[in-house]
Amino acid sequence: MTKSELKKFRETLEAKQAELELFVRNREGIAIEKSPDALDEVQHAAERELAIRNLDRESQLLRNVRAALRRIEEGAFGVCLHCEEDISPKRLAAVPWTPFCIQCQEIADRNQSGEGSESLEELLVPAA
């Protein structure tokens, strides 16, 4: 990967990091609101649960972006953490924070859905 390509990925990742940090700091949606009406209370609880899920998803994405920036600094960006093969340029262009090539990502996804036979820890052991 050329220095200009790495610079482009770094800029993209830094912009995404700044965007996510703003989102993660805004926690107004998870405030517990009391209401005398039971239906309003249920509605507030549902909205809070959705806000918590969104915050969790965006926090995980922020961790992935930061990890990708660390891989750039370490010179390991664009290399799958599992099989240590190069990640395709198309995949990196679409998801620059990805730690896995498409095949290893499919294994990880099956694993998370309970379909796979490998555990995530087994998947990450070769990367250590």
Image: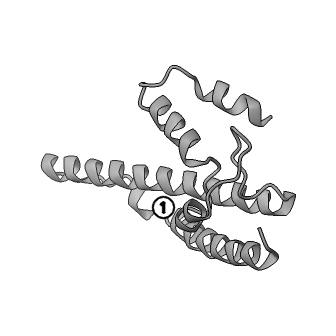
Q: x, y (%) of residue 37?
A: 14, 51
Q: x, y (%) of residue 20?
A: 56, 67
x 21%, y 52%: residue? 43
How many marks do you count on the picture? 1
The residue furthest right is 74
Indicate left or right for 88 with 54 as reference: right
Quadrant holding the N terminus:
bottom right
Corner quadrant of residue 19:
bottom right
| Mark 1 burial class by Cα count in 10 Å: few <14, some 14-19, many 20+ | few
Is 13 rendered above or below residue 58? below
Work out whether residue 109 can be spotted. Answer: yes
Corner quadrant of residue 92:
bottom right
x 76%, y 80%: residue? 4
Is 49 rendered above or below residue 61? above
Indicate left or right for 104 with 34 as reference: right
Work out whether residue 31 can be spotted. Answer: no
- Amino acid under label 1? Arg
Is 122 rendered above or below residue 97? above
Return the residue at label 1: 27
**As rendered, which of 48 and 14 lies closer to the eye?**
14
Q: Does dot 1 land on a helix, a strand or a loop?
A: loop
x 75%, y 58%: residue? 77
